Image: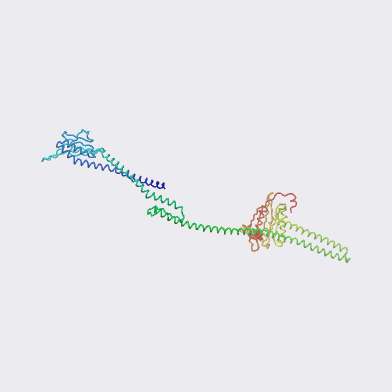
Amino acid sequence: MFGLKAHLTRRLMAYITTSVLGALLISVATQYWALQPLLERTRAGNVDAAIENLAVLVTQSLWVYNETGAIDAANAILRDQFISGVSVNDHTRLFSYSNGDLAQSDILNPQMSSLVRTETDTALTVLVPLIVKAEDDSKRDFNIGTLQIHSDNRLIRQQVNELAKITLSVSAVILIVLQFLFYFLVRQLIAKPLEHFTLHVQIYAADLAPETVAVTPELLGRSDEIGRLYEIFNAQRKSLIAQNLSLTEYRSHLEQLVSQRTAELSAANETLVDSLEQLKQAQTELIRSEKMASLGILVSGIAHEVNTPLGVAITAASHLSEELRSTQKRLTNNQLTRSGFETFLAECHETETLLSHNLNRAAVLIQSFKKIAVDQASDQARYINLHGYLNEIVMSLGPKLKHTGIEVLNRVPDTINLDVPSGALAQIITNLILNSFIHGFKNGTVAGTITLDAEQHGDQALSIVYQDNGDGMGAEVLERIYDPFYTTRRSEGGSGLGMNIVYNLVTSKLHGQIETTSQLGEGLKIVMTIKLLNEQPAYQQENAL
Ligand SMILES: Nc1ncnc2c1ncn2[C@@H]1O[C@H](COP(=O)(O)OP(=O)(O)OP(=O)(O)O)[C@@H](O)[C@H]1O
Ligand SMILES: [Mg+2]
């Protein structure tokens, strides 16, 4: 507070003092230069007045030989403040008097016919002829002597300096008095009210409590600028309080809103988590049913394949039992001839061959069915011969492909043996062939070829290339082919999981990569590059399928 007051007052004082002092100095300087010619004119006037008033007195005194009178008159001239020297003499050289700065001059004034005024840089000199008019009728003029008046210019300068000194001293006194006056005024009119106002602001600016009444008695009712400031501040504070109140209300409303929304959101989130869980379960269920579906296809395939040899075997067996019954009957009736018995034996032999051949075929089929079924149901890695294993898979799909114009070419060299989760491989190839059947060859109504190729890249990797020359697909289908539930045949029962399962099996079960390329009408090509497991023990190689 004091700082503000002192600072402001001091600065104001400094400004005012500097400007007043400046103005004073300028006016003194102006006066100084103006005074010189003024004083010069005054001097001229004084000299003229002295000549007019006192030269006559000197003349008359000299005329009557009153020397004392002449001296007194001369000294009276000298008393003028601008006259520094005076000298009088008559032309008879009987009287001569000098005083002032002419006192030492022993040169007599020359006889003058008229007044001579000489002005130099240093002084003004006036030579006045002392003339007496004759009182008789002749009225003659008698030039009886000369009066010299000398005025040194230093007298003027002294006066000027004197005046300047007085002006300066008076100004200094006035200045000091003014300073005190200003100081008092500034303090009373500005600094003190400002101090009160600052205090007022400091106390009430931070206090926005509606019940606090902001009053500073010293500022109350003032009509000047500070009074206005005080009123404006109070009005602003009031509006701030109002705003603050509505803000607080709004904030509490917002907080309520936020907590309400948060509760709603967390409820929605819980529902989402539940839905996600349900979706995951549904997906697992779908994947499982997809697996079961391919197992179903396998079962029906094998059942179909096994049907033929078993049917032949049953026919052969019933034929054999028929033959046996008729032979036995003929034997009972003693009608069995030797040639008849030999025929029966040949029949028996033939039927037995047929039976054992067909039963063997069925056994082989069941065996391979068992292998693939177990493979599909388990995730176990098994050492297989790729060519043979692919044949098994294709065979399991036989009934689906049998009466169609779709041909599957297994071009995989039969030298490739590998350790692989064979169930996954079976599921992959089954899915791909079914896709070609459904999408590429219009549910088997169109003829075409599926080719299977494979190439081994050292000990580390193997690529299996699957191709069909069916309808292929456009870029937008190709882009989404691995997306779960993406299908172009939803209305016909497609779930859109087939290729997603293929992708997952290749990447996670076979630790490989899959790349599908296709164009509409140009068939499709799928390259699966899988990582080979470590080299197999010899006994497994021998047992490779
Ligand atoms: N060989 C193919 N030829 C042409 N289009 C194909 C082929 N394979 C897949 N597609 C296209 O890719 C889509 C996705 O295939 P995916 O196997 O994932 O699903 P889906 O066969 O339609 O249904 P799901 O296999 O679940 O029964 C198919 O709907 C089809 O449009
Ligand atoms: Mg499919």
The x, y position of residue 481, in whole percent, is 63, 58
- The image's colour scheme reads rainbow
For the residue pair 268 and 442, the one nearer the viewer reads as: 268
Horizontal arrangement in the rendering, residue 106 relative to residue 259 (left or right): left
> Which quadrant of the frame does ligand 1 lie within?
bottom right
Which corner quadrant holds the C terminus? Answer: bottom right
Q: Is residue 378 visible?
A: yes
* Among the 4 quarters of the image, the one containing residue 115: top left
In this view, the residue farthest toward the right is: 334
Locate residue 321: give its quadrant. Answer: bottom right
Query: Where in the figure is residue 132, as x and y percent of width and height?
Result: 15, 39
Is 420 situated left or right of 51 in this image?
right
**Left or right: residue 101 compared with residue 542:** left
Q: Which of 524 and 508 is in front in this view?
A: 508
Q: Quadrant of residue 148?
A: top left
Residue 403, horizontal then vertical, whole percent: 71, 62
Report the number of discs.
Answer: 0
Judged from this view, the residue extending furthest toward the left is 137
Q: Can residue 472 be seen in this view?
A: no
